[in-house]
Protein backbone atom coordinates (compact mmCIF):
# COMPACT_ATOMS: atom_id res chain seq x y z
CA UNK A 1 0.00 0.00 0.00
CA UNK A 2 1.52 3.38 -0.99
CA UNK A 3 1.92 6.17 1.50
CA UNK A 4 -1.13 8.40 2.03
CA UNK A 5 -0.10 12.04 1.92
CA UNK A 6 -1.77 14.81 3.87
CA UNK A 7 -1.86 17.12 0.90
CA UNK A 8 -0.88 17.30 -2.76
CA UNK A 9 -0.78 20.59 -4.68
CA UNK A 10 -1.45 20.57 -8.37
CA UNK A 11 0.40 23.40 -10.10
CA UNK A 12 3.46 25.49 -9.32
CA UNK A 13 2.44 29.05 -10.17
CA UNK A 14 1.78 31.77 -7.62
CA UNK A 15 -1.28 30.05 -6.14
CA UNK A 16 0.29 26.59 -5.83
CA UNK A 17 3.56 27.91 -4.39
CA UNK A 18 1.80 30.07 -1.82
CA UNK A 19 -0.31 27.07 -0.80
CA UNK A 20 2.95 25.08 -0.57
CA UNK A 21 4.59 27.67 1.72
CA UNK A 22 1.60 27.70 4.08
CA UNK A 23 0.96 23.94 4.18
CA UNK A 24 4.69 23.24 4.58
CA UNK A 25 4.92 25.65 7.51
CA UNK A 26 1.92 23.85 9.02
CA UNK A 27 3.93 20.61 8.88
CA UNK A 28 1.80 18.94 6.18
CA UNK A 29 4.80 18.05 3.95
CA UNK A 30 3.05 19.03 0.72
CA UNK A 31 3.97 17.41 -2.56
CA UNK A 32 3.75 19.85 -5.48
CA UNK A 33 3.15 18.41 -8.94
CA UNK A 34 4.66 21.10 -11.13
CA UNK A 35 2.57 20.41 -14.23
CA UNK A 36 3.13 21.17 -17.91
CA UNK A 37 4.17 24.80 -17.33
CA UNK A 38 6.34 24.80 -14.18
CA UNK A 39 6.10 28.20 -12.52
CA UNK A 40 2.89 29.05 -14.37
CA UNK A 41 2.28 32.24 -16.28
CA UNK A 42 4.81 34.30 -14.27
CA UNK A 43 7.59 32.10 -15.58
CA UNK A 44 7.03 33.54 -19.06
CA UNK A 45 6.67 37.16 -17.94
CA UNK A 46 9.53 39.62 -17.76
CA UNK A 47 9.38 42.44 -15.19
CA UNK A 48 6.63 42.21 -12.55
CA UNK A 49 6.04 45.66 -11.10
CA UNK A 50 2.76 45.19 -9.27
CA UNK A 51 3.65 42.47 -6.77
CA UNK A 52 3.86 44.20 -3.38
CA UNK A 53 7.25 44.19 -1.72
CA UNK A 54 9.44 44.78 -4.78
CA UNK A 55 9.79 48.57 -5.15
CA UNK A 56 11.92 48.22 -8.30
CA UNK A 57 9.92 45.26 -9.66
CA UNK A 58 11.17 41.70 -10.01
CA UNK A 59 11.56 39.35 -12.99
CA UNK A 60 8.68 36.83 -13.10
CA UNK A 61 10.95 33.75 -13.14
CA UNK A 62 12.94 35.10 -10.17
CA UNK A 63 9.78 35.73 -8.17
CA UNK A 64 8.64 32.16 -8.83
CA UNK A 65 12.07 30.76 -7.98
CA UNK A 66 12.07 32.66 -4.67
CA UNK A 67 8.63 31.30 -3.77
CA UNK A 68 9.72 27.75 -4.61
CA UNK A 69 12.85 28.05 -2.43
CA UNK A 70 10.73 29.46 0.38
CA UNK A 71 8.37 26.45 0.20
CA UNK A 72 11.31 24.00 0.02
CA UNK A 73 12.86 25.57 3.12
CA UNK A 74 9.81 24.46 5.10
CA UNK A 75 9.77 20.93 3.67
CA UNK A 76 7.65 21.07 0.49
CA UNK A 77 8.77 18.62 -2.18
CA UNK A 78 8.40 19.05 -5.94
CA UNK A 79 7.95 16.60 -8.79
CA UNK A 80 8.06 17.47 -12.50
CA UNK A 81 4.86 15.54 -13.09
CA UNK A 82 1.33 16.09 -14.31
CA UNK A 83 -2.07 14.64 -13.56
CA UNK A 84 -3.63 12.19 -16.02
CA UNK A 85 -6.79 11.28 -14.12
CA UNK A 86 -8.28 11.79 -10.69
CA UNK A 87 -10.94 10.29 -8.42
CA UNK A 88 -11.97 13.03 -5.99
CA UNK A 89 -14.77 11.12 -4.24
CA UNK A 90 -12.45 8.28 -3.16
CA UNK A 91 -11.04 8.30 0.40
CA UNK A 92 -8.16 8.84 0.13
CA UNK A 93 -8.27 10.83 -3.11
CA UNK A 94 -6.54 8.92 -5.93
CA UNK A 95 -4.34 10.74 -8.41
CA UNK A 96 -3.11 8.99 -11.53
CA UNK A 97 -0.04 10.96 -12.51
CA UNK A 98 2.85 10.74 -14.96
CA UNK A 99 4.97 9.33 -12.07
CA UNK A 100 2.39 6.77 -10.90
CA UNK A 101 -0.54 6.67 -8.49
CA UNK A 102 -0.54 9.06 -5.52
CA UNK A 103 -2.95 8.85 -2.58
CA UNK A 104 -3.78 11.93 -0.57
CA UNK A 105 -6.24 13.10 2.08
CA UNK A 106 -6.54 16.55 0.53
CA UNK A 107 -5.92 18.09 -2.87
CA UNK A 108 -5.24 21.74 -3.69
CA UNK A 109 -5.96 22.43 -7.36
CA UNK A 110 -3.81 25.34 -8.54
CA UNK A 111 -3.41 24.27 -12.14
CA UNK A 112 -3.97 27.78 -13.50
CA UNK A 113 -5.14 28.98 -16.86
CA UNK A 114 -3.16 29.30 -20.02
CA UNK A 115 -3.48 32.31 -22.30
CA UNK A 116 -4.54 31.40 -25.80
CA UNK A 117 -1.92 32.27 -28.40
CA UNK A 118 -2.18 32.49 -32.16
CA UNK A 119 0.42 29.76 -32.48
CA UNK A 120 2.70 31.56 -34.98
CA UNK A 121 6.41 30.68 -34.49
CA UNK A 122 7.31 34.40 -34.73
CA UNK A 123 4.74 35.24 -32.04
CA UNK A 124 6.15 32.57 -29.70
CA UNK A 125 9.72 33.75 -30.32
CA UNK A 126 8.87 37.34 -29.32
CA UNK A 127 6.92 36.69 -26.10
CA UNK A 128 8.38 39.13 -23.59
CA UNK A 129 10.03 41.13 -26.42
CA UNK A 130 6.98 43.01 -27.65
CA UNK A 131 4.41 40.19 -27.55
CA UNK A 132 2.31 39.76 -24.41
CA UNK A 133 -0.97 38.26 -23.26
CA UNK A 134 -1.35 40.52 -20.22
CA UNK A 135 -2.06 44.23 -20.62
CA UNK A 136 -2.07 44.85 -16.86
CA UNK A 137 1.39 43.29 -16.56
CA UNK A 138 3.15 44.74 -19.59
CA UNK A 139 1.16 47.77 -20.84
CA UNK A 140 3.37 50.15 -18.90
CA UNK A 141 6.37 49.31 -21.12
CA UNK A 142 4.64 50.75 -24.20
CA UNK A 143 4.29 54.35 -23.12
CA UNK A 144 3.90 56.61 -26.18
CA UNK A 145 4.12 53.69 -28.65
CA UNK A 146 1.65 52.23 -31.14
CA UNK A 147 0.41 48.73 -30.38
CA UNK A 148 -2.06 46.13 -31.64
CA UNK A 149 -4.51 43.93 -29.76
CA UNK A 150 -5.90 40.75 -31.32
CA UNK A 151 -9.41 39.56 -30.46
CA UNK A 152 -13.04 40.52 -30.69
CA UNK A 153 -14.35 39.69 -27.22
CA UNK A 154 -14.55 41.56 -23.92
CA UNK A 155 -10.93 40.72 -23.04
CA UNK A 156 -9.67 42.38 -26.21
CA UNK A 157 -11.84 45.49 -25.65
CA UNK A 158 -10.79 45.69 -22.01
CA UNK A 159 -7.11 45.33 -22.94
CA UNK A 160 -7.41 47.93 -25.69
CA UNK A 161 -9.12 50.43 -23.38
CA UNK A 162 -6.59 49.80 -20.62
CA UNK A 163 -3.65 50.15 -23.02
CA UNK A 164 -4.78 53.63 -24.15
CA UNK A 165 -3.42 54.83 -20.77
CA UNK A 166 0.07 54.22 -22.13
CA UNK A 167 0.01 53.76 -25.88
CA UNK A 168 -0.20 56.55 -28.44
CA UNK A 169 -2.58 54.41 -30.51
CA UNK A 170 -4.16 50.95 -30.16
CA UNK A 171 -5.31 49.01 -33.23
CA UNK A 172 -7.69 46.13 -32.51
CA UNK A 173 -7.46 43.34 -35.09
CA UNK A 174 -10.44 41.00 -35.27
CA UNK A 175 -10.72 38.03 -37.61
CA UNK A 176 -14.46 38.47 -38.34
CA UNK A 177 -16.91 41.24 -39.25
CA UNK A 178 -18.92 40.96 -36.04
CA UNK A 179 -17.62 41.32 -32.51
CA UNK A 180 -18.28 38.92 -29.66
CA UNK A 181 -17.73 41.68 -27.08
CA UNK A 182 -20.63 43.05 -25.04
CA UNK A 183 -22.32 46.13 -26.52
CA UNK A 184 -21.13 48.45 -23.78
CA UNK A 185 -17.45 47.43 -24.06
CA UNK A 186 -17.54 47.61 -27.84
CA UNK A 187 -19.16 51.06 -27.79
CA UNK A 188 -16.49 52.34 -25.41
CA UNK A 189 -13.76 51.07 -27.72
CA UNK A 190 -15.43 52.55 -30.83
CA UNK A 191 -15.86 55.91 -29.09
CA UNK A 192 -12.23 56.10 -27.96
CA UNK A 193 -10.21 58.50 -30.13
CA UNK A 194 -7.00 56.44 -29.76
CA UNK A 195 -8.51 53.08 -30.71
CA UNK A 196 -8.92 51.87 -34.28
CA UNK A 197 -10.90 48.68 -34.94
CA UNK A 198 -9.98 46.62 -38.00
CA UNK A 199 -12.28 43.72 -38.81
CA UNK A 200 -11.73 40.70 -41.08
CA UNK A 201 -8.04 41.01 -40.28
CA UNK A 202 -5.58 38.34 -39.15
CA UNK A 203 -1.91 38.42 -38.20
CA UNK A 204 0.30 36.39 -40.53
CA UNK A 205 3.65 37.18 -38.95
CA UNK A 206 5.25 39.13 -36.13
CA UNK A 207 8.32 40.93 -37.43
CA UNK A 208 11.61 41.30 -35.56
CA UNK A 209 12.56 37.72 -34.64
CA UNK A 210 16.19 38.20 -35.71
CA UNK A 211 16.48 41.50 -33.84
CA UNK A 212 14.78 39.87 -30.76
CA UNK A 213 12.49 42.91 -30.60
CA UNK A 214 9.15 43.33 -32.26
CA UNK A 215 9.32 45.51 -35.38
CA UNK A 216 5.73 45.38 -36.68
CA UNK A 217 3.15 42.93 -37.97
CA UNK A 218 2.27 41.48 -41.34
CA UNK A 219 -1.52 41.49 -41.43
CA UNK A 220 -4.02 40.22 -43.99
CA UNK A 221 -7.59 41.12 -44.82
CA UNK A 222 -9.37 37.76 -45.04
CA UNK A 223 -12.05 39.13 -47.41
CA UNK A 224 -9.75 40.76 -49.99
CA UNK A 225 -6.59 38.73 -49.35
CA UNK A 226 -4.64 41.99 -49.25
CA UNK A 227 -1.59 42.01 -46.97
CA UNK A 228 0.26 44.95 -45.45
CA UNK A 229 2.71 45.87 -42.71
CA UNK A 230 1.32 47.41 -39.54
CA UNK A 231 3.92 49.57 -37.78
CA UNK A 232 3.40 48.72 -34.13
CA UNK A 233 5.87 48.03 -31.30
CA UNK A 234 3.66 45.75 -29.25
CA UNK A 235 1.18 42.92 -29.77
CA UNK A 236 -1.28 41.93 -27.06
CA UNK A 237 -3.30 38.76 -27.36
CA UNK A 238 -6.85 39.16 -26.09
CA UNK A 239 -8.24 35.91 -27.44
CA UNK A 240 -9.14 34.36 -24.11
CA UNK A 241 -7.73 31.96 -21.54
CA UNK A 242 -8.17 28.22 -21.11
CA UNK A 243 -8.49 27.04 -17.52
CA UNK A 244 -6.44 23.89 -16.96
CA UNK A 245 -9.30 21.91 -15.47
CA UNK A 246 -10.31 19.43 -18.17
CA UNK A 247 -9.22 16.48 -16.03
CA UNK A 248 -11.86 17.46 -13.47
CA UNK A 249 -14.82 17.32 -15.88
CA UNK A 250 -17.47 15.14 -14.27
CA UNK A 251 -15.55 15.21 -10.95
CA UNK A 252 -16.06 18.86 -9.97
CA UNK A 253 -18.56 21.48 -11.14
CA UNK A 254 -17.10 23.53 -13.99
CA UNK A 255 -18.71 26.65 -15.42
CA UNK A 256 -19.61 27.05 -19.10
CA UNK A 257 -16.02 28.04 -19.97
CA UNK A 258 -14.43 25.23 -17.95
CA UNK A 259 -13.38 27.16 -14.80
CA UNK A 260 -13.78 25.24 -11.52
CA UNK A 261 -16.76 26.53 -9.57
CA UNK A 262 -16.04 27.39 -5.96
CA UNK A 263 -18.03 28.61 -2.98
CA UNK A 264 -16.37 30.71 -0.24
CA UNK A 265 -13.62 31.27 -2.83
CA UNK A 266 -11.72 27.99 -2.59
CA UNK A 267 -14.23 25.26 -1.64
CA UNK A 268 -15.02 23.12 -4.69
CA UNK A 269 -18.39 21.58 -5.46
CA UNK A 270 -19.89 18.65 -7.31
CA UNK A 271 -23.51 18.88 -8.35
CA UNK A 272 -23.69 21.88 -6.05
CA UNK A 273 -22.50 20.04 -2.90
CA UNK A 274 -19.08 20.74 -1.34
CA UNK A 275 -16.45 18.12 -2.20
CA UNK A 276 -14.63 17.32 1.04
CA UNK A 277 -10.87 17.82 0.97
CA UNK A 278 -10.60 19.32 -2.52
CA UNK A 279 -9.82 23.02 -2.81
CA UNK A 280 -9.22 25.17 -5.87
CA UNK A 281 -7.26 28.41 -6.00
CA UNK A 282 -5.70 30.81 -8.49
CA UNK A 283 -6.62 31.24 -12.13
CA UNK A 284 -8.22 27.80 -12.54
CA UNK A 285 -11.17 29.22 -10.57
CA UNK A 286 -10.76 32.95 -11.21
CA UNK A 287 -11.75 34.42 -14.55
CA UNK A 288 -12.07 37.92 -13.19
CA UNK A 289 -8.86 39.15 -11.54
CA UNK A 290 -6.13 36.79 -12.80
CA UNK A 291 -3.35 38.62 -10.97
CA UNK A 292 -0.27 37.14 -9.29
CA UNK A 293 -1.24 38.68 -5.98
CA UNK A 294 -4.85 37.46 -6.07
CA UNK A 295 -3.64 33.97 -7.03
CA UNK A 296 -1.19 34.03 -4.12
CA UNK A 297 -3.99 35.20 -1.79
CA UNK A 298 -6.31 32.38 -2.79
CA UNK A 299 -3.43 29.88 -2.48
CA UNK A 300 -3.07 30.99 1.13
CA UNK A 301 -6.82 30.57 1.68
CA UNK A 302 -6.79 27.07 0.18
CA UNK A 303 -3.90 26.11 2.47
CA UNK A 304 -5.70 27.39 5.57
CA UNK A 305 -8.86 25.47 4.57
CA UNK A 306 -6.72 22.34 4.08
CA UNK A 307 -5.20 22.69 7.54
CA UNK A 308 -8.66 23.20 9.07
CA UNK A 309 -10.07 20.22 7.18
CA UNK A 310 -7.31 17.88 8.41
CA UNK A 311 -7.42 19.26 11.96
CA UNK A 312 -11.17 18.64 12.17
CA UNK A 313 -10.46 15.02 11.22
CA UNK A 314 -7.83 14.61 13.93
CA UNK A 315 -4.74 14.91 11.72
P1 LIG B 1 -14.12 35.24 -25.83
O1 LIG B 1 -14.10 33.78 -26.08
O2 LIG B 1 -15.39 35.92 -25.51
O3 LIG B 1 -13.52 36.00 -27.11
C1 LIG B 1 -12.35 35.57 -27.70
C2 LIG B 1 -12.15 36.40 -28.97
O4 LIG B 1 -10.90 36.05 -29.53
C3 LIG B 1 -13.24 36.15 -30.01
O5 LIG B 1 -13.58 37.35 -30.64
C4 LIG B 1 -12.55 35.19 -30.99
O6 LIG B 1 -12.95 35.37 -32.32
C5 LIG B 1 -11.11 35.63 -30.87
N1 LIG B 1 -10.22 34.52 -31.16
C6 LIG B 1 -10.17 33.31 -30.53
N2 LIG B 1 -9.19 32.55 -31.05
C7 LIG B 1 -8.61 33.32 -32.02
C8 LIG B 1 -7.54 33.10 -32.93
N3 LIG B 1 -6.85 31.95 -32.93
N4 LIG B 1 -7.21 34.09 -33.79
C9 LIG B 1 -7.88 35.26 -33.79
N5 LIG B 1 -8.91 35.53 -32.96
C10 LIG B 1 -9.26 34.57 -32.08
O7 LIG B 1 -12.99 35.45 -24.68
P2 LIG B 1 -12.79 36.71 -23.72
O8 LIG B 1 -11.55 36.40 -22.95
O9 LIG B 1 -12.86 37.97 -24.46
O10 LIG B 1 -14.03 36.62 -22.73
C11 LIG B 1 -14.27 35.43 -21.97
C12 LIG B 1 -15.42 35.70 -21.01
O11 LIG B 1 -15.02 36.63 -19.99
C13 LIG B 1 -16.63 36.33 -21.70
O12 LIG B 1 -17.78 35.83 -21.10
C14 LIG B 1 -16.48 37.80 -21.41
O13 LIG B 1 -17.71 38.49 -21.42
C15 LIG B 1 -15.85 37.77 -20.01
N6 LIG B 1 -15.07 38.99 -19.79
C16 LIG B 1 -15.70 40.07 -19.24
C17 LIG B 1 -15.03 41.24 -19.04
C18 LIG B 1 -15.75 42.38 -18.46
O14 LIG B 1 -16.94 42.32 -18.30
N7 LIG B 1 -15.07 43.44 -18.09
C19 LIG B 1 -13.60 41.39 -19.40
C20 LIG B 1 -13.04 40.21 -20.01
C21 LIG B 1 -13.77 39.07 -20.19
P3 LIG B 1 -14.41 34.91 -32.83
O15 LIG B 1 -15.35 35.94 -32.31
O16 LIG B 1 -14.26 34.90 -34.31
O17 LIG B 1 -14.64 33.54 -32.24
Image (cartoon, grey):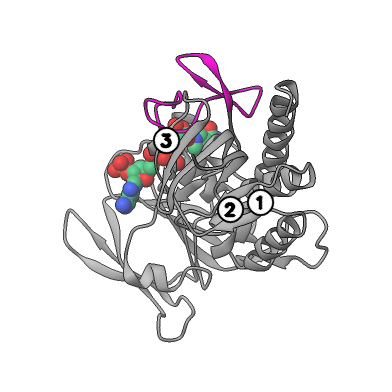
Q: Residues within 10 Å of mark 3 (few under 14, many from 20)?
A: some
The residue at which mark 3 appears reads as 86
Report helix, strand or loop for mark 2.
loop
Q: Is residue 94 left or right of residue 220?
A: right
Q: Quadrant of residue 294?
A: top right
Report helix, strand or loop for mark 1.
helix
The residue at which mark 1 appears reads as 17
Q: Is residue 172 left or right of residue 3?
A: left
Between 164 and 256, the one lying in front of the other is 256
First along the sequence among labels 2 and 3 = 2
Q: Which residues are magenta?
A: 248-277
The residue at which mark 2 appears reads as 12
Q: Residues within 10 Å of mark 1 (few under 14, many from 20)?
A: many
Q: Residue 270 magenta-drawn?
A: yes
Answer whether labels 2 and 1 touch (C-beta < 8 Å): yes
Where residue 193 sits: x, y (%)?
53, 50
Q: Which residue is drawn at the image coordinates 59% and 57% (left, top)? A: 78
Between 77 and 5, the one lying in front of the other is 5
First along the sequence among labels 1 and 3 = 1
First along the sequence among labels 2 and 1 = 2
Q: State whether label 1 is within 8 Å of ligand 1.
A: no
Q: Which residue is drawn at the image coordinates 76% and 59% (left, top)? A: 73
Residue with the most extreme bottom position: 211
In 3D space, how far apart are the residues under numbered discs 1 and 3 (Cα atoms)?
Answer: 21 Å
Q: Is residue 57 left or right of residue 128?
A: right
Determine the main secondary structure of the stretch shown in magenta: loop
Task: Name the front one of labels 2 and 3.
Answer: 3
Between 2 and 166, the one lying in front of the other is 2
Where residue 160 sits: x, y (%)?
52, 50
Q: State whether label 3 is within 8 Å of ligand 1.
A: no
Where residue 125 sits: x, y (%)?
41, 73
In 3D space, how far apart are the residues under numbered discs 2 and 1 (Cα atoms)?
Answer: 5 Å
Amino acid sequence: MSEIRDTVILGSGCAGLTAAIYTARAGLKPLVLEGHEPGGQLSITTLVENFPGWPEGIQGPELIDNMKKQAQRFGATFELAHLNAVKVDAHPIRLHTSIGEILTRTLIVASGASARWLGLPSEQALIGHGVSSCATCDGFFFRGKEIAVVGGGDSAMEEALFLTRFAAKVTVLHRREHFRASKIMLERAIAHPNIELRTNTVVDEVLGVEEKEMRGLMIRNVKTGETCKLDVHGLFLGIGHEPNAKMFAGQLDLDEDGYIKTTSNVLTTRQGAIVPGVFACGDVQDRRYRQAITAAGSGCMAALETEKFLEERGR
